[in-house]
Image: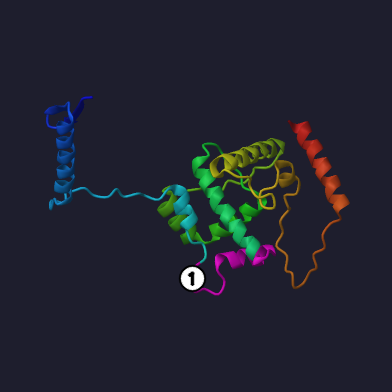
Amino acid sequence: MSLSLSTGRGFDFDFDNDNDRGLLRRLEEDLIDRNANRSDPQTALVPPIIEPSLRERVEAFALDEAGVALPFTSRLAREQGWSHAYAGRVVTEYKRFVVLAMEAEHPVTPSEEVDQAWHLHLVYTRSYWQGLCREVLGRDLHHEPTNGGGAETAKFIDWYARTLESYRKLFGEEPPDDIWPAPERRFAESPKARWVDATKFWLLPKPKWFLAAARSIFEEKNQANQ
């Protein structure tokens, strides 16, 4: 068997026997030692700098400011009437949505819960525009609401379904159903949001039979518009 060594300077050597191969190994070891002892920083070997991925940067982005009485997650929980634990999960899914918006290569639509986290983050203008968009993403991520009408509804249903599919591909798992419901539920149950002073009003849930009937009507209208 013949082995070859290229110096990278236009000289090649062939090694055909055990003695030559032993010499080759000694030459390789000597080159490694010489490289390790170089004092010139421009020629010495430098460990590669591994930059964090977009997903890692977004996941590491802190929404909760330290040392404040009402951090982001707590405010989200209070405004939406969620437990703090659930609000924390929504924040995680909001960050995943941001990653999807950057990497899915198609328009994306959030779930209602994720959208509420997005709305709240937009209020924190420095955190959103400077911290997240410019420093982490390197570009602006705008929130574009619907213009209303059947065509718009059909468009966002399609975008949402594609968002769920890209979620599965990118993260390798199913999106949590209590935060990312199926498209027919997401839009049938999309709340007509109102600010309500809970100290002055009681909020009572509508009966399940009423919600089921409303969902059925919505699905029929959606099919008629397609």
| Quadrant of the drawing holding the C terminus | top right
Residue corresponding to mark 1: 66
Measuring from the top left, give residue 143's x and y in whole percent.
Answer: 56, 48
Residue name at image x 14 percent, y 27 percent: 12
Q: Residue furthest front?
A: 18
Say which of 191 and 30 sits in front: 30
Residue 67 lies left or right of residue 158; in this view the side is left
Residue 66 against residue 131 in the figure, above or below: below
Residue 40 lies left or right of residue 124; in this view the side is left
Residue name at image x 52 percent, y 73 percent: 68
- In the image, the segment drawn in magenta is 65-84
Residue name at image x 80 percent, y 68 percent: 202
Amino acid under label 1? Ala
Say which of 173 and 214 sits in front: 173
Residue 218 visible in the current orientation: yes
Measuring from the top left, give residue 97's x and y in whole percent.
Answer: 56, 48
Measuring from the top left, give residue 168's x and y in whole percent.
Answer: 59, 41
Confirm whether the magenta stretch covers residue 72. Answer: yes
